[in-house]
Image (cartoon, helix red, strand yellow):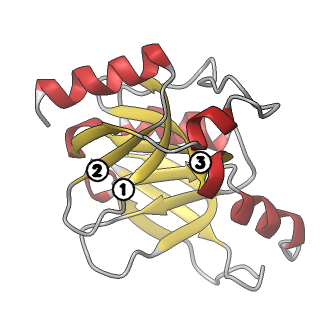
Amino acid sequence: MSSKARRRLEKAAATQRLVRISRSPRHADPIDGFVVAVGRKWALVRDVVEGGYFDALVAIRVKDVTQVRKDRTFAGAFARTRPEWPPSAPLHADLRTTKGLIDSMRDLAPLVGIEQERRRGGVVWIGVPVEVDDGLLRLDQVAPDGSWRDEPHGFRFRRITKVVVGGRYQDALAATMVARE
């Protein structure tokens, strides 16, 4: 990532302006939202969905940011009328390392979404982090029907490109999950 993109992330955080963030790798979806914190390795964005409604808290790798553009729609003005305004970063968010980020994010919501956007397909793994150590995250996964997968799934820190908590989908899934036996 260029220092220009980092400066734009920092400016977006300072001005609380709605932005569209484009990222590498090639298959990474853009993120529309308000940048709430920029760290050494990770940035936090409070994303918005159509119309300017707040959704999840999204962590993205700073080095993957390729472009930060101002949103020119009404969505930013509408977001300012919402009870969630102004968006802010959690006080204890550690954006220096992937381990610190995962530890911070798992304290915010019952489920954490993990993405590895290096491949086409946009798969999100959702679950509960059970081990975060030695460059590896082990996640007890929840299936789309709310049941638990049999075995935890492992993710190498260096392959994680996005971490999501607190979105409407994850909140609904958490509310209807089958109790772990």
Q: CA distance from mark 3 to mark 1?
A: 12 Å
Label 3: which secondary element? strand
Residue under label 1: 30
Image disc number at residue 180: none
Quadrant in which the C terminus appears: bottom right
- Residue 87 or residue 91, whichever sits in front: 87
Q: Amino acid at mark 2?
A: Ser
Image x and y of residue 126, in percent: 60, 66
Q: Amino acid at mark 1?
A: Pro
Image position of 20 with respect to 8: above or below: below
| Residue 110 seen in render | yes
Precedes in sequence: disc 2 or disc 1: 2
Residue depicted at x 24% and y 20%: 7
Q: Residues within 10 Å of mark 3 (few under 14, many from 20)?
A: many
Image x and y of residue 152, in percent: 55, 72
| Residue 55 seen in render | no
Image position of 19 with respect to 131: above or below: above
Residue under label 2: 22
Q: CA distance from mark 2 to mark 3?
A: 15 Å
Image disc number at residue 48: 3
Residue depicted at x 88% and y 64%: 175
Image x and y of residue 70, in percent: 37, 35
Q: Amino acid at mark 3?
A: Val
Label 2: which secondary element? strand
